Image: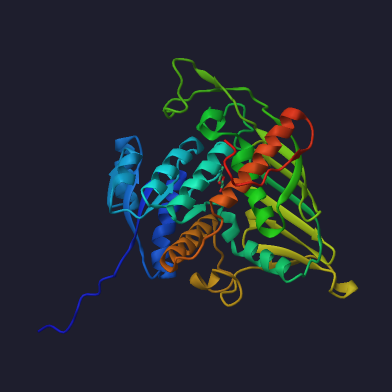
Amino acid sequence: MNSKKRGVFLSYLRVGLIGYKFMGKAHTQAYKNTNFYFNPKEPFQLRAICGRNEENVKFAAHTYGWESYETDWEAVIERDDIDIIDIGTPSDTHKDIAISAANAGKHVLTEKPMALNVRDAKKMLKSVTDAGVQHMVSFTYRRVPAIRLAKRIIAEGRIGKVYHVRANYLQDWLADPQAPFAWRLDKNVAGSGAHGDLNAHIIDLTRYLVSEFDEVVGMSETFIKKRSIEAGSTNEEKTNDSASRDVTVDDATLFLARLDNGALGSFEATRYATGRKNNEYIEINGSLGSIVFNFERMNELQFLSKEDEPHLQGYRNILVTEPEYHEYMDAWWPPGHLIGYEHAFTHQASDLAQAITQQQPIYPNFEDGLRCQQVLEAVDNSIKSRTWEKVEKTNYLNL
Ligand code: SOE
C-alpha cells in the first residue's frame, strides 16, 4: 500500500468578507499573507466575498481568490461553512451585520469606526458578549511594529510620567474643491467625516499607549458644503437627478482632552491638509523622555531619553525592523527591508487567527470600539454645547 499520505489540515478558519473595495482588498491580502507568512495552526479559508453589485463582486472573487461570492450579506451569515464575518463596508452597515453575525454564532471583525453612534456600539457589544464570539475592531495601527515598540518603551517607564499627547491625522484628498461627492461625505452612511474616520485612529492609539479620556472640548468645520456627483458614482453617492449633493459631515475636527492619567491631549483630523497624504502623527512627552511616530515613516520611531548623557541627548531615530527584537518583524524580511500599510492588516489577521484557535481574548475588541465611540460622541456633544464634555465609559444600554 502506498505509505505516502496526502497532508490534510484538520480545520480552517473560514471567512465571509462583506465588502470588496479598499478594505476588502486589504483584508483579503491579510488573510492570504497570514497563511503564507505566519503559518497559523488553522489557516484562513476565503469562503465568500459579498457585494451588492454582482458584476463587481464576481470579478473581485475571481481576482482576489475567494471561493464564492454573494450579493446579500444575510446569505453569507446564513451559511454554515463560514466561521468569521469580516465587515469591510461603510459604517451604517456595521451594526446590523455584526449583530446578525453574532446571533448566528460567527466571530466578528468590523472596520472602524465601529458604529454610527454610542447606542449602536453598545448594542453590538452586548450581542457579541451574549453570543460568546470573538469580536475585534480594525484599528490596525496598534499592530505597526513601531507602535508596539512605543508601547514597550512606555511600559518600561522610559519616558516616565506622561504629560502630553499631541496627535493628528492629516490627509488632503478633499482639499481640491473639484473633488466629487463620496459616501464618506454623507452622515447617514459614514456617521461623520474626518472625525470618525481619522480621529478614531488617534483616539484608539492614545487609549492603547497612554490612557482613557476624561473630558474633551472640540470644534469642526465643513469647508466645502456641496460637491458634484461624478459619473459612475455608487448608489450611496447618487441622488435623484441633482448634479451635486450637500456634504453633511465634518471636513476637519480638532479637540482638546484631559486624560484620566492627568495628561493633556490635542487632536486634529482633517482631509484638507494640503500635501499631507496619510500623516498620522503622535508625540508623547513624559518626565524622562518623548516618543514620536509618523505613519508616513512607519518603519521608524523617534525616542528621546533624559537618561542619556546631557551632551548626547536628542531624538534618536530607531529603524524598527529587527526580526529578533521588534514585534512581527520575524515573519518578514531581514533588517532594513521595511514593511508597509498592508502589513498591519496581516498582523491583525494573524492575531485574530491565534485568538480564535487558542480561545484567548483579542484586542482592540468591541469594548475598545465602544470606548472610542464614546470619545467621538463626547467631542460631537461639546461642539454642539460649546463647552467641555465628560466622556462616558459605561457599557450598559441605558435605553
Ligand atoms: C481614509 O481615507 C482611510 O482609508 C481610513 O478610512 C483608514 O482607516 C486608514 O487606514 C487610511 O485612510
Determine the residue located farthest toward the left in the rendered image: 1
Residue 154 spot, x, y in % from top left: 73, 66
Q: Is residue 31 above or below residue 191?
A: below
| Residue 290, quarter of picture | bottom right
Q: Is residue 201 above or below residue 289?
A: above
| Residue 148, quarter of picture | bottom right
Is residue 211 or residue 295 the one in the foreground?
211
Residue 107 spot, x, y in % from top left: 42, 54
Residue 87 spot, x, y in % from top left: 44, 46
Residue 165 spot, x, y in % from top left: 76, 53
In the image, is 235 to the left or to the right of 390?
Answer: left
Q: Quadrant of the N terminus?
A: bottom left
The scheme the figure's colours follow is rainbow
The quarter of the picture showing ligand 1 = top right
Q: Residue at x 63, y 48 (%)?
A: 371
Q: Residue at x 32, y 38 (%)?
A: 72
Residue 273 appearing in the image: no
In the image, is 29 to the left or to the right of 121?
Answer: left
Q: Residue at x 66, y 48 (%)?
A: 203
Q: Quadrant of the C terminus?
A: top right
Determine the residue located farthest toward the right in the rendered image: 310
How many discs appear? 0
Residue 184 appearing in the image: yes
Is residue 188 or residue 229 the one in the foreground?
188
Q: Is residue 114 above or below residue 35?
A: above
| Residue 187, quarter of picture | top right
Q: Residue at x 76, y 70 (%)?
A: 157
Is residue 394 or residue 368 the one in the foreground?
394
